[in-house]
Amino acid sequence: MDAYDLVVLGGGSGSQVATAAAGDGLSAAVVEPGPLGGACITRGCVPSKALIHRADIVAELRHASEFGIDAELEDVDYGEFTAAIHDAVYEKADRQAESIEAAENVDRYRGTGRFVDERTIEIDASDGGDSDPGDTDGERIRGDTVVIAVGGRPVVPPIDGLDAVEFLTSEDALFLDSRPDSLVIVGGGYIGAELGYFFGALGTEVTIVGRSDRLVPREDDTVSDVVTDALGRYCDVRTGYEATAVESVDGGVAVTAEPSGEGGNGDDAIDREADDLLLATGRRPNTDTLNLEATGVETDESGHVETDDRLETSVDGIWALGDVLGEQPYKHAADYETRVVTANVLDDAGEAVDYAAMPHAIFTSPQVASVGRTEGELEDAGREFNAATVPVDAAPLGMILHADDGFVKVLAAPDGEILGCHIVGPHASTLIQEVVTAMDRGEGTVDDVAEPVHVHPALSEAVYAAFDELSSRRYSTAPDWRDIDGA
């Protein structure tokens, strides 16, 4: 049995802990059954955003007449661009595999790792491995330190008849050879919203069925309202419904959805037929593959690993990061957690995670980005705060882009501390960054955003204008083009 200073279970962000350890002269192993890079690279955020970029182009063409441009969309070579995206992301995964396999002091094991005891891992190379398991199947390795970073997978909800019909998950939907003519998406979170926008913009007849009374219900209410209304341009949005039964019908699928009791479009059940069914009801951690019963590692009722604020589990020397934690299910959060675990494991830094300035984005149209608390969360906590909401078209470029439904919403404590910021509109995922930096590296006040000079005419002026409304400064030069119809 080979023994290592460090064993990482999972080939995503956590594999960087192994390469850092190897750089310090320690022996390390990475155990991963599939392509390296984690879900984000090959079956998540990167390919999905590549698809959405195509949808954005199609949507721009179809709305070109608003800008006095006569454009016609003749064809979309769906299979061509999905194949190109597939090849690009898997080439990246191959490059990461080559990098690890060429590194000194790091071994890669293709297979699923399962605990035999708190330090011993057995490799099942037949479980999703990308090569002949050969002599590695059943091999055992041991690590003085173990990092659990096995990620997650799509949830398959308990819907009557689901075991008798074919369906897609959010991972299956990324590389289809052809675009379905019609599609029912079950799930109104950010994954369902993004894929609904993608397919709807390309011409698929899409129905989204969501339990809550709005799409993306975890966002600030004002954000959820705009996204729900905007997706109605591309999809038949049925909020306040829960899919209860499915069956095969004429080569497609029929879905029955009943009121969830959380508001929505009505009190009667609805039936929808489509070529395909897509389940976008969240993700679950892959901890059920690890045989954690052989260890003292504790999990919550949903299977997420419980850790202290340094990301060490209930067992000394076993750490966890990424989607197995459930706290922040984003690639950038996993990368941040990787830095924390690396510092604590290699340098005994005693560093604690801090998610107060952890941003996220939703790549619908309009785009969404948020950091910090929502207005509802602050009200529920009884927190005193001030709020300012400025439309994106208060900035001249927002007006030029016809970003009519975009806005910047700022939530701040009476002393000016930034509590949250929510942006809807073009390039929201980029615009949020100066707010994140102010919260994380500055004093974290509205003046940290309002005082620096902002480029004119750029969309960042909308962020400036919103923070300026809550600023303590006596004089303002913030733009306001809200009284202009457009250009």
Image: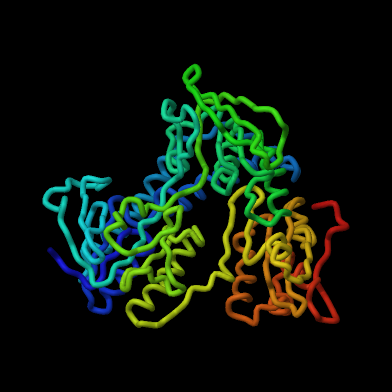
Q: Residue at x 41, y 73 (%)?
A: 339
Q: In the figure, is residue 51 to the left or right of 118?
A: right
Answer above or below: position of 354 versus 1.
below
Answer above or below: position of 383 versus 101.
below
Q: Nearer the viewer, residue 285 or 461?
A: 285
Q: Nearer the viewer, residue 288 or 198?
A: 288
Extreme residue toward the top, this view: 250
Residue 104 seen: no
Q: In the figure, is residue 342 to the left or right of 433?
A: left
Answer above or below: position of 353 versus 159.
below
Location of residue 381 (image quadrant): bottom right
Q: Residue at x 68, y 62 (%)?
A: 377
Residue 98 seen: yes
Q: Residue at x 32, y 59 (%)?
A: 11
Q: How many marks?
A: 0
Q: Quadrant of the N terminus?
A: bottom left
* Residue 387 position in % (x across, y down): 78, 67
* Residue 38 position in % (x across, y down): 38, 55
Q: Nearer the viewer, residue 192 or 181?
A: 192
